[in-house]
Amino acid sequence: MARPADLPPMLAHARPRPFWPDTVPASTPAPALDGDIACDLAIVGGGFLGLWSAVHARLRYPDARIVVLDAGVCGGAASGRNGGFCAPSISHGPGNAMRRWPDEAETLIRLGAENLNDFAEDLEALAIEAEFERGGKLVVARTPWQEEALKETGRLFARCGIPARLLRGTALAEKLDSPVYTCGLWEENYALVNPAKLVAELRRVAMASGTCLYENTPVTGLRTSDDGVGLQTPGGALRAGKVILATNAARPLLRRLAPAVIPVYDYALMTAPLTQAQLASIGWTGRHGISDSGNQFHYLRKSADNRILWGGYDAIYHFGGRRDAERTQRPQSFARLAEQFAEAFPPLADTPFDYAWGGVIDTSARTTFFTGLSEGGRVAWAMGFTGQGVTATRFAALSLLDRLDGLQTERTRLRMTSTRPFPFPPEPLLYASVRMAQHGLAQEDRTGRCGLTLKALDALGIGFDS
Ligand SMILES: Cc1cc2nc3c(=O)[nH]c(=O)nc-3n(C[C@H](O)[C@H](O)[C@H](O)COP(=O)(O)OP(=O)(O)OC[C@H]3O[C@@H](n4cnc5c(N)ncnc54)[C@H](O)[C@@H]3O)c2cc1C
């Protein structure tokens, strides 16, 4: 990481990479594809979506030849570097479901809660050890308008039968004691996981069940013919009966999907391990996750060894949708995060950060994923998870398998997943619109008032979130 002179001393020794992979024993990468092969189902992408697809495909088709191809290594992208928040939602929260799909919101909310239960059951049934903890989540507010929004969310949760309660004063300080937060909404049904361990375990389960994995194997082209789908890679070609595209924020292999999502960079810091006394000094003795409110929000959680992950706030879109490894390091975002951490937690202001990293989020204008079938029903894809894909990818994987099987299920019938979001415009309009939307969101955070730009975008069903 470049170390400008004005980088705060707490970041002086931060390693420029995600924390989570360092908690997983090193494994030898799978070989790259070398030669031509054939299979029944090929999955492009070895993140959560691709690996859940592989694991559930094996449960459905014990004898199928299943292949997973990843351009790098499994979990090298978003799945190995996220916050690990496991939402009981597939719709980026109940409020988003109510606002965008009022007719199916009840179903979306139920399916989201069921998916978290099924996710937990899968981990147990597959003997996956990934530090899964179902400790709840606290959302905190710092301004009167954020408090109002939290109360509104509390009322909405009550109408939907979601257990939650507003906390203030001592009740709040027992979950988090900070001079900047005045109110909190406690949501009981929320979980955390170590994302790199989850990827490693899903990879292990997939391989143990006979799925072939090729890493460092980018798929560079896709062509359909009568007898299947051909995937081109630098080392050879693969012919598959069916294909799942699970490439998230990478440039899509089906070019026509490109306007549906934009790559947005999100950043995080991880402190050194903290003592129980240090954690008690900010009232955080439980194992719950926390986020603050507003459009530019932070998320924070503990690791198994009691570090604090502090991420979010900046959401950076680069002109032309540029994506490259260098952009996962952004000293100005790290410095801002460190400063905000010290402001929120004065007793921990001198705590050093051991890791600083970023990752790409596949942002859709509706902030939820959607699925599709193409190439005569042989190719299925899902994308647009927008910062809430840890549990939703499991649900999406099942939807893709249903779709490839031609099944009509509750999952495939959802309007949320079977229609496409509003497409993003081409450049240079896109960059200008994102800047305008971000300006409006920051202004709303500062003043509590929603400006004209945001109202207009909202009327068109366009949101911008990370
Ligand atoms: C910093 C950060 C924090 C986040 N925090 C949370 C959180 O707390 N909770 C939550 O629910 N979500 C969170 N998310 C979002 C979540 O991580 C993603 O939604 C989820 O990991 C997406 O999984 P995926 O399998 O679709 O994508 P990825 O994990 O990105 O996997 C896609 C894979 O496809 C491969 N690939 C791409 N193109 C090709 C190609 N042409 N050929 C072969 N392989 C290819 C890539 O190498 C990659 O491994 C966060 C994301 C980030 C970046």
Image (spheres, helix red, strand yellow):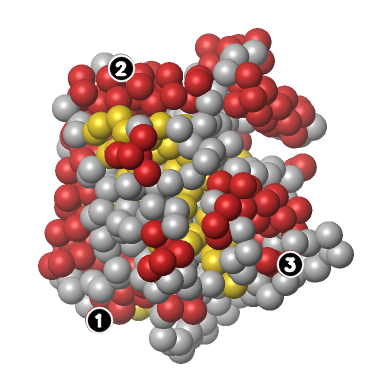
- Identify the residue at horizontal 35%, vertical 22% (top origin): 151
Give the residue number, with chain letter if any, for mark 3.
Answer: 9
Tell me residue 284's x, y (percent): 38, 55
Give the residue number, with chain letter if any, for mark 2.
Answer: 102
Q: Is residue 256 above or below residue 326?
A: above
User: Upstream in the sequence, badge 1 or badge 3?
Assistant: 3
Give the residue number, with chain letter if any, for mark 1.
Answer: 208
Q: How far apart are marks 3 and 2 (CA)?
A: 49 Å
User: Going by the image, does 122 lie left or right of 277?
Assistant: left
Element type where label 2 sits in the image: loop
Task: Point out the frontmost of discs 1 and 3.
Answer: 3
Type of amino acid under label 3: Pro
Q: In the image shown, does 53 or 84 lie closer to the viewer?
A: 84
Q: In the image shown, does 346 or 107 lie closer to the viewer?
A: 346
- Identify the residue at horizontal 32%, vertical 53% (top origin): 288
Task: Point out the frontmost of discs 2 and 1.
Answer: 2
Tell me residue 196's x, y (percent): 42, 70
Element type where label 3 sits in the image: helix
Residue 297 in sight from this viewpoint: yes
Q: How far apart are marks 1 and 3 (CA)?
A: 45 Å
Q: In this view, does 375 lie above or below 143?
A: below
User: Upstream in the sequence, badge 2 or badge 1?
Assistant: 2
Quadrant holding the C terminus? top right
- Identify the residue at horizontal 44%, vertical 24% (top origin): 147
Residue 44 in sight from this viewpoint: no
User: Going by the image, does 50 lie left or right of 216?
Assistant: left
Tell me residue 424's x, y (percent): 62, 30
